[in-house]
């Protein structure tokens, strides 16, 4: 027993530590009480009993109050309508409240939101508060969940609230505050839905920091490290908003009013809320920044994609959201530093002067502005809004430390060019003074400002690699450079065409073309085909295809011309084949001599296959019974186009009828038959 004492003590200490840690995770009230509310995330379809939904790691559960469910709460100046029609103020009442019963979710939650249906006449108001508890005893303070500030409710549609973030805990309670003016009717709440969310499952911050967007190579102000959507755990199965793009002119700053013990969980929650609950199909912000200065990729689609952060002002703007509530609290230094880096990079990339004012949406506005400058909202919080002047100035100052970024829009890097080629380079930096373009270190064009466009006659340069370089000169004597290798190709492609494997004749108007082409520079891309000089439309190059010859028997010349990727045409290559759909023709007379039976046959197009001549005998005048085909002697040589004679000894004519057949070199068979007693002819093609 004494030997086991140390072990028992260790186990007890371990269990005590686990219990203490679990208690801290489930409560965390001191942190929660110091923070503001978080946004509402999810509104699911209601049902008679709690329902759960999951999006990979996300868990959501609905608590709906309607009908007889109103009777389970406490009324103060309010009343339930008959037959469960809803909740309203008592007659003549100016204000009142309703407190729900406590309800336990089936999993710990970290965020909740609301949606209600009903009537809210002019001059009335409905406010909703909520509180949570880890054990059903120790409750958080009541927190009001304001309506979503971007809501423009459709007539008859629900009212939707912001999101409130909470520490882990499964007990929930809400309170409704109803107010009415003396001249207004009471608001009526027909049904209220609370959605409870757990978005904690997913990547952690350490792994997320290793999943950054790839670095840019254009020079200028470097893009800050940005954690990709995959890094923070975006569930792309929720994303169904197709990207569209506009050149941004403004940067709009937001705050999310969120409680962020786990910023990645907050992002996943906001993504779910925007994509599913709000039915936007994706998260609404272009970028988000947490308190540690980590920057996250928001809206899917890359740079310049239109997001959904300011409704009527989404186009031509970039939305940056700061995770947290900055109504009274200042931004952490790391967050402010990251925001300044983002503003400087965006300003350099899109030519936005941080301290400037330019027209947008019909009015001249600051280039960097707060959400409240556009809509009736307190966003991005008073403490951030007061700092915008400083943030603009610091972003402009950072621009001075970097050379202007330069890009080459055309031609593409490593691509081939030929003939007269358009070269286009640009710099969106607000500090740009002049642009210069060099080919193999020789200055060929300059431009005061952006863009620089030059027509390059590549025929005066040798085929092969050349270096294009653009220099963006700034006012601060800092120059940005970008070099690009291109391949000059003014040589035509080479090629060939073969019809039906090289056959000289065909009876089928559909033939097979074997096409071969090569180009050392831009590569073969297109081809044109012609039948006897009639050219068809250009099409993509492919090595094999079927081709229908034009109608009518005779020689057919199929020609092809190949085009490389920069428009150089090849010489015309061709092949010829004889289209012969007509079978050999028999003479309309037959000679019955003393010892032989003879008949003439001819094929003027492809010529006769002399060795194919055969005859057969019949004992019933050719009605049903025919003997086997037997070789028949034929004059002339193979391929002869002159009339030839088939003959057989009369002694072999043992039946009452005889027939002959023969094939031409295109594969057409022809047959003739006659009776011994009375010569009669009938000609038919045989497809054997």
Image (cartoon, rainbow, N blue to C red):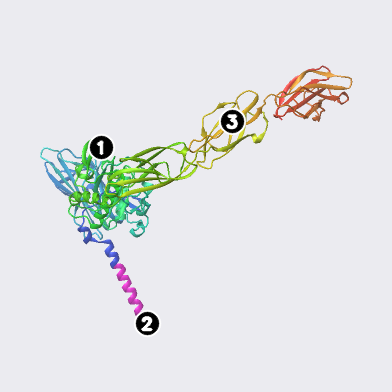
Distance from disc 3 to disc 2, alpha carbons, whole Å, reads: 98 Å
The boundaries of the magenta stretch are 1-19
In this view, the mark in front (3 or 1): 3
Distance from disc 3 to disc 1, alpha carbons, whole Å, reads: 65 Å
- Give the camera-side residue of 460 and 655: 460
Q: Quadrant of residue 561?
A: top right
Residue at disc 2, secondary structure: helix
- The reply to whether the C-beta atoms of the residues labelled 3 and 1 are less than 8 Å apart is no
At which x and y percent is residue 465?
47, 45
Q: Sort mark 3 into few (<14), some (14-19) or many (20+) by Cα contacts within 10 Å.
A: many
Query: Is any atom of residue 171 visible in this view?
Result: no
At which x and y percent is residue 655?
84, 24
Q: Quadrant of residue 597?
A: top right
- Give the camera-side residue of 46 and 16: 16
- Give the camera-side residue of 362 and 109: 362
Q: Which residue is painted at 21% across and 56% down in the image?
A: 35
Residue underneath mark 1: 154
Considering the whole magenta stretch, tell me its main secondary structure: helix
**Left or right for 509, reference 347:** right
Which comes before the other along the chain, label 3 or label 1?
A: 1
Residue underneath mark 3: 559
In this view, the mark in front (2 or 1): 1
Q: Which residue is painted at 73% across and 24% down in the image?
A: 603
Q: Which quadrant of the figure contains the C terminus? A: top right
What label does residue 3 carry, if any?
2
């Amino acid at each position: 027993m004494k030997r086991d004492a140390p072990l028992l003590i260790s186990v007890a200490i371990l269990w005590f530590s686990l219990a203490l840690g679990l208690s801290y995770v489930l409560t965390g009230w001191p942190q929660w009480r110091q923070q503001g509310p978080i946004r509402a995330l999810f509104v699911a379809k209601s049902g008679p009993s709690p329902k759960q939904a999951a999006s990979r790691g996300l868990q959501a559960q609905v608590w709906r109050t309607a009908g007889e469910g109103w009777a389970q709460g406490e009324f103060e100046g309010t009343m339930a309508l008959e037959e469960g029609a809803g909740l309203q103020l008592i007659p003549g009442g100016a204000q009142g409240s309703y407190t729900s019963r406590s309800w336990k979710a089936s999993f710990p939650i970290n965020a909740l939101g609301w949606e209600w249906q009903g009537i809210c006449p002019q001059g009335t108001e409905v406010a909703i508060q909520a509180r949570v508890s880890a054990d059903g005893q120790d409750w958080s303070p009541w927190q009001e969940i304001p309506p979503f500030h971007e809501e423009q409710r459709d007539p008859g549609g629900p009212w939707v609230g912001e999101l409130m973030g909470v520490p882990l805990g499964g007990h929930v309670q809400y309170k409704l505050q109803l107010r009415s003016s003396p001249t207004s009717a009471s608001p009526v709440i027909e049904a209220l839905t609370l959605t409870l969310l757990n978005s904690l499952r997913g990547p952690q911050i350490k792994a997320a920091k290793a999943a950054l967007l790839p670095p840019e190579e254009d020079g200028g102000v470097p893009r800050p490290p940005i954690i990709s959507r995959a890094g923070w755990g975006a569930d792309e199965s929720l994303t169904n908003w197709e990207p569209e793009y506009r050149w941004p002119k403004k940067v709009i700053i937001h705050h999310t009013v969120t409680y962020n013990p786990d910023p990645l969980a907050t992002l996943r929650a906001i993504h779910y809320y925007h994509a599913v609950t709000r039915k936007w199909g994706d998260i609404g912000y272009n970028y988000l920044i947490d308190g540690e200065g980590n920057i996250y990729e928001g809206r899917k689609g890359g740079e310049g994609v239109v997001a959904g952060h300011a409704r009527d002002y989404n186009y031509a703007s970039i939305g940056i959201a700061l995770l947290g509530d900055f109504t009274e609290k200042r931004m952490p230094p790391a967050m402010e530093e990251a925001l300044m880096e983002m503003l400087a990079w965006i300003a350099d990339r899109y030519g936005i002067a941080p301290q400037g004012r330019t027209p947008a949406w019909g009015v001249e506005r600051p280039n960097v502005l707060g959400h409240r400058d556009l809509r009736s909202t307190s966003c991005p919080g008073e403490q951030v809004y007061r700092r915008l002047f400083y943030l603009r100035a610091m972003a402009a100052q950072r621009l001075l430390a970097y050379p202007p970024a330069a890009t080459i829009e055309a031609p593409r890097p490593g691509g081939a060019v030929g003939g007269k080629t358009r070269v286009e380079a640009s710099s969106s930096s607000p500090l740009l003074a002049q642009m210069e373009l060099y080919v193999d270190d020789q200055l060929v064009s300059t431009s005061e400002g952006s863009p620089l466009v030059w027509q390059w006659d590549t025929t005066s340069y040798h085929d092969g690699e050349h270096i294009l370089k653009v220099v963006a000169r700034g006012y601060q004597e800092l120059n940005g450079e970008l070099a690009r290798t291109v391949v000059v190709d003014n040589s035509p492609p080479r090629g060939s065409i073969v019809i039906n494997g090289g056959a000289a004749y065909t009876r089928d108007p559909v033939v097979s073309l074997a096409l071969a082409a090569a180009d050392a520079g831009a590569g073969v891309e297109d081809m044109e085909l012609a039948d006897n000089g009639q050219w068809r439309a250009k099409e993509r190059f492919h090595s094999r295809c079927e081709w229908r010859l034009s109608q009518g028997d005779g020689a057919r010349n199929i020609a092809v011309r190949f085009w490389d990727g920069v428009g150089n045409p090849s010489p015309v290559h061709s092949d010829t084949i004889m289209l012969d759909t007509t079978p050999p023709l028999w003479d309309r007379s037959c000679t019955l001599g003393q010892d032989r039976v003879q008949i003439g046959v001819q094929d003027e197009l492809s010529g006769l296959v002399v060795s194919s001549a055969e005859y057969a005998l019949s004992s019933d005048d050719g009605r049903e019974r025919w003997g086997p085909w037997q070789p028949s002697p034929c004059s002339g040589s193979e391929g002869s186009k002159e009339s030839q004679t088939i003959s057989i000894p009369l002694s072999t004519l043992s039946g009452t009828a005889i027939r002959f057949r023969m094939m031409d070199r295109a594969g057409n068979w022809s047959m003739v038959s006659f009776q011994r007693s009375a010569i009669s002819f009938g000609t038919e093609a045989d497809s054997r």
